[in-house]
Image: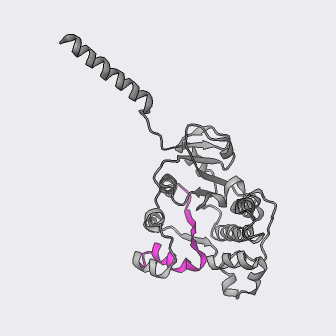
């Protein structure tokens, strides 16, 4: 009986040991790195944000970790000494009126949905941010060009925007916008598209970048801090929105954040180095919000 009990014990111990080798006891959903690939804490990111005038928080639109960290960073910045202004790619400039009415408490969720073009994931991913602004009485800026005009650029080029009315032009960056077709980000778009869309594809991206930069600066004042939420591609590699911001206001202090996804989050892959001042590396198995 003793020998049988010892045998059972050895087998159970061996199985547990094998299980321990196969399954890590610590599951890490994300890590934060600096541009050089050194792991840093959220506290370090927050301290850098406190030293910045304008923060571009690049996200994956369906990434729960990025949205959570956006909320946490914004929440901390709201209680800092500088007044905070919020803005987002997810709201188009011609929807500023209902967005402002919502954060002021003049209309409710249902009315906002009726009056503004909300993204499908608004309730899960962006409503928490707008509600932070609402609770704290802070402005929330709709920074993006109305999608129909970006689509027009894709079809007909930037020059076609000159035929718009003065009211329509007020919803975008002043025309004509500066455009550098040789920027690596725009060149990469052409390569990824395999020639589809031609030269107008990156131009449609550029009018979005220029417009977001325009409305960020139009709503920023010295002594304030502005946090902007946008897809990572709009600010990765210090291009996109940041390129336009620096053309107009090179002396402001900018901070960029990017989101990437990897199988192994313990070390930043070479292709993700230098994307931003801070890179949030999320486990590729993380559940998406949609």
| In the image, residue 265 above or below residue 103 | above
Highlighted range, magenta: 81-107
Asked whether 243 or 136 is in front, the reply is 243
Asked whether 108 or 237 is in front, the reply is 237
Asked whether 156 or 268 is in front, the reply is 156
| In the image, residue 261 above or below residue 40 | below
Residue in the picture at 59% in, 80% down? 94
Q: Position of residue 67 (x, y in %)?
A: 50, 57
Q: Reply yes or no: does residue 64 show up in magenta.
A: no
Q: Position of residue 176 (x, y in %)?
A: 79, 76
The reply, left or right, for residue 213 in relation to residue 101 is right
Residue in the picture at 53% in, 44% down? 42
The reply, left or right, for residue 139 in relation to residue 108 is right
Q: Position of residue 1 (x, y in %)?
A: 17, 12
Q: Position of residue 25 (x, y in %)?
A: 41, 33
Q: Total number of numbered labels?
A: 0
| In the image, residue 30 above or below residue 133 | above
Q: Residue furthest top?
A: 3
Asked whether 134 or 29 is in front, the reply is 29
> Which image quadrant is residue 140 in?
bottom right
**Is residue 226 in view?**
no
Task: Give the colouring mode of the picture.
Answer: one colour
**Is residue 187 in view?**
yes
> Which image quadrant is residue 152 in?
bottom right
């Amino acid at each position: 009986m003793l020998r049988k009990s010892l045998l059972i014990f050895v087998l159970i111990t061996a199985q547990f040991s094998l299980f321990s080798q196969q399954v890590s006891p610590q599951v890490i959903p994300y890590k934060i790195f600096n541009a050089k690939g050194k792991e840093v804490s959220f506290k370090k990111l927050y301290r850098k944000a406190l030293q910045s005038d304008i923060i571009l928080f690049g996200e994956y639109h369906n990434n729960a970790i990025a949205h959570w960290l956006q909320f946490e960073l914004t929440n901390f910045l709201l209680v800092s000494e500088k007044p905070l202004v919020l803005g987002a790619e997810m709201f188009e400039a011609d929807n500023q009126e209902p967005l402002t009415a919502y954060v002021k408490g003049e209309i409710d969720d249902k009315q906002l949905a009726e009056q503004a073009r909300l993204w499908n994931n608004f309730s899960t991913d962006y409503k928490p941010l707008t509600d932070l602004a609402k609770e704290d009485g802070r402005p929330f800026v709709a920074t993006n060009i109305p999608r129909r005009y970006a689509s027009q650029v894709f079809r007909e080029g930037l020059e076609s925007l000159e035929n718009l009315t003065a009211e329509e032009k007020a919803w975008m960056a002043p025309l004509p916008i500066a455009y550098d077709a040789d920027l690596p980000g725009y060149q990469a778009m052409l390569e990824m598209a395999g020639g589809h869309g031609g030269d107008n594809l990156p131009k449609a991206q550029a009018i979005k970048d220029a417009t977001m930069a325009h409305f960020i600066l139009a709503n920023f004042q010295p002594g304030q801090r502005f946090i902007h939420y946008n897809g990572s591609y709009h600010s990765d590699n210090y291009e996109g929105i940041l390129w336009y911001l620096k053309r107009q206001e090179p002396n402001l202090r900018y901070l960029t954040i990017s989101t990437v996804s990897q199988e192994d989050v313990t070390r930043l892959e070479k292709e993700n180095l230098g994307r931003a001042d801070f890179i949030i590396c999320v486990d590729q198995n993380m559940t998406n919000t949609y």
